[in-house]
Amino acid sequence: MKLKAKYKFKIHKKSKKNLTWEEAKAYCKSLGDGWRMPTRVELLLMYEAKEEIGGFANNDYWSSTEVAGTNAWTQDFHDGFQTFNGKSYTDSVRAVKDY
């Protein structure tokens, strides 16, 4: 899926649920060849195009954007709200990679 925006990235077909931030980061890396967690901005773009992209649950999704080392930004795919959670919480992740 390509988004028509300043940021150009490919979105993995599947999400993974119930992962801590570190587990989410490792999962994205395990997909190989450049897959990574999306940034806070990339997640917002994905939320705004979620109907077109498809495959999102009404969960919070991790971003790679850290806050004070112990937290990371998340995107709620139910109401669009962005906040940060402790990295030990479990949320969903959807990998992206640059192209």
Image: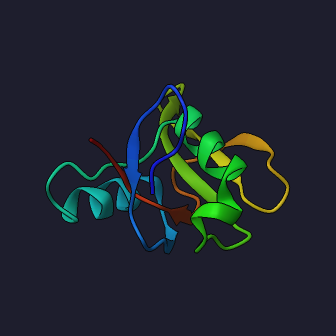
The residue located at (47%, 61%) in the rendering is 94
User: Where is residue 36 drawn, in percent x and y?
Assistant: 32, 49
Pick whichever, 22 or 51, lies toward us. Answer: 51
Relative to residue 15, is residue 29 drawn left or right? left
The residue located at (38%, 43%) in the rendering is 9
Relative to residue 20, is residue 30 drawn left or right? left
Q: Is residue 91 above or below residue 46?
A: below
Q: Quadrant of residue 40?
A: top right
* Residue farthest left in this picture: 33
User: Where is residue 56 drawn, in percent x and y?
Assistant: 62, 70
Q: Is residue 31 above or below residue 44?
A: below
Q: Is residue 39 above or below residue 88?
A: above
Quick one: quadrant of the C terminus?
A: top left
Q: Is residue 6 above or below residue 80?
A: above
User: Where is residue 68 drawn, in percent x and y?
Assistant: 54, 25
The residue located at (74%, 70%) in the rendering is 58
